[in-house]
Amino acid sequence: GKEWIVLGIETSCDDTAAAVVCSDGRILGESVAKQDELNDLYGGVKPGAARDAHAQHIEATISNALEQAAISVEQLDAVAVTMGPGLELCLRVGFHAASALAVQHGIPFLSVHHLEAHCLVANMFRLASRQQEDPRAVAEDAFQEQAPAIVLLVSGGHCQLIRRDRQGHYEVYGGTVDDSIGEAFDKVARLLQLDVAGCGGGPAVERLAAEWALEGKASSLVFPIPMRKYRNCNMSYAGLKTAVRLAVEKGSFDKGEIAFAFQAAAVKHLMERTARAIEWSKSGAVDSGDHVRELTVCGGVASNQQLRSALQDIAQKHALDLVVPPVKYCTDNGVMIAWAAIEKIERYGLHTLQVDPRGLE
Ligand code: KG4
Ligand code: ZN
């Protein structure tokens, strides 16, 4: 088939990102401007300030990606941009940059669902790794041969268990009833008064837990696993956060001990729900072709090593392939937007997807 080269633009939250990706799975160019300093300053993402930072960096981010790819705008098959969900003020910056580029150069324009892009990017890395084994086999069937998968979408903003079928349809099995797991990590970092500058709450808690585990001390601190009496795929992190606050207030535990116990419970809870999602997908399958064959994880929390090794165990137990994108592509990025657009184009054809952005203003 034809090879597609697509520019993906992402500005839904605090990362200004752009990437040029080819349908064979190669990243031709990518660029990102992060807003970590602003987030440190405001203790989170402040939409107006984030919008201004996007506006300031969007042009350079896009031209960096194109320059790295060493192609001109005219050589692109399409320009794709995140249309949501996300912060409206921020989304607008990406939309305007993408649509201006498309209109000015007469390039097809299409929009991408942010969460779908998180769900699909793992396919790109599966494709890339299989390509090394057998380059010819992959080119033919890469897009048809999609295994149904359970997708774990775990970030600061999202916390869901989704079944993705081979037709590119999604069924949400469950989600958090209160905080996301990423938020819980961030709040625990604050409760423990960790220095999160430049790394964020999740990694700070993970590092502290790992350091404590290395010390090898015994601990009596165990947090209860949430939601056990609800036999569904929903999650809850508010109670766990409260349990952490009470443990901090008690004053008789090490910070590392608390971080470790929190992380253990947070991951265990997620794994119990994931195991149930896998069971659900089995009982709902119509024929063997529909059986879930993969377990995929995306979102910022996917970089957590405890989570990754727990996923490895569960995948092995259920004979599923575990597909985890490199950490860098688990968080918001331009590559996932370009890649999601490429999968859509392969599936539905460019002409059914492209829209005139002038009609959307
Ligand atoms: O996907 P992401 O960059 O942004 C969105 O929230 O959409 O995810 C960021 C979230 C934050 O809550 C952060 O604390 C969490 O992911 N996170 C982690 C780790 N790295 C990032 N949580 C646990 N362990 C980590 N290593
Ligand atoms: Zn995201």
Image (cartoon, helix red, strand yellow):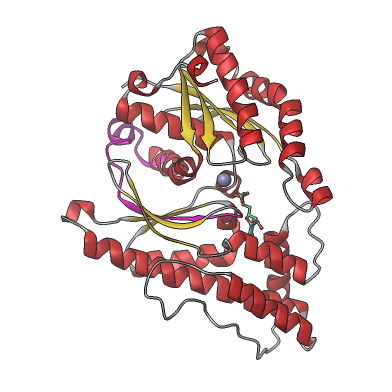
Ligand 1: quadrant of the figure: bottom right
The C terminus - image quarter: top right
Query: In front: 233, or 212?
Result: 233
The answer to whether one can see residue 215 in this image is: no
Query: In front: 31, or 247?
Result: 247
Q: Position of residue 102 (x, y in %)?
A: 53, 14
Q: Quadrant of residue 144?
A: top left
Q: In which quarter of the image is residue 260?
A: bottom right
Q: Is residue 186 magenta?
A: no
Q: Does the magenta stretch include residue 144?
A: yes
In the image, taking residue 44 as reference, residue 13 lies left or right, namely left
The answer to whether one can see residue 320 in this image is: yes
Residue at position x 51%, y 34% in the image: 337
Q: In which quarter of the image is residue 281?
A: bottom left
In the image, taking residue 191 as reference, residue 153 lies left or right, namely left
Q: Where is residue 60 in the image (x, y as percent from the top left)?
A: 72, 22
Q: Where is residue 108 in the image (x, y as percent from the top left)?
A: 45, 16
The N terminus - image quarter: top left
Check the image and report above or below for 128 versus 157. Answer: above
Looking at this rendering, what residue extends furthest in the left direction?
A: 287
Total count of labels: 0
Q: What stretch is highlighted in magenta?
A: 132-156
Residue at position x 47%, y 40% in the image: 117
In the image, taking residue 74 as reference, residue 294 lies left or right, namely left
Check the image and report above or below for 267 versus 340. Answer: below
Check the image and report above or below for 15 versus 31. Answer: below
Q: Position of residue 359 (x, y in %)?
A: 48, 17
Check the image and report above or below for 115 versus 223. Answer: above
Residue at position x 44%, y 30% in the image: 341
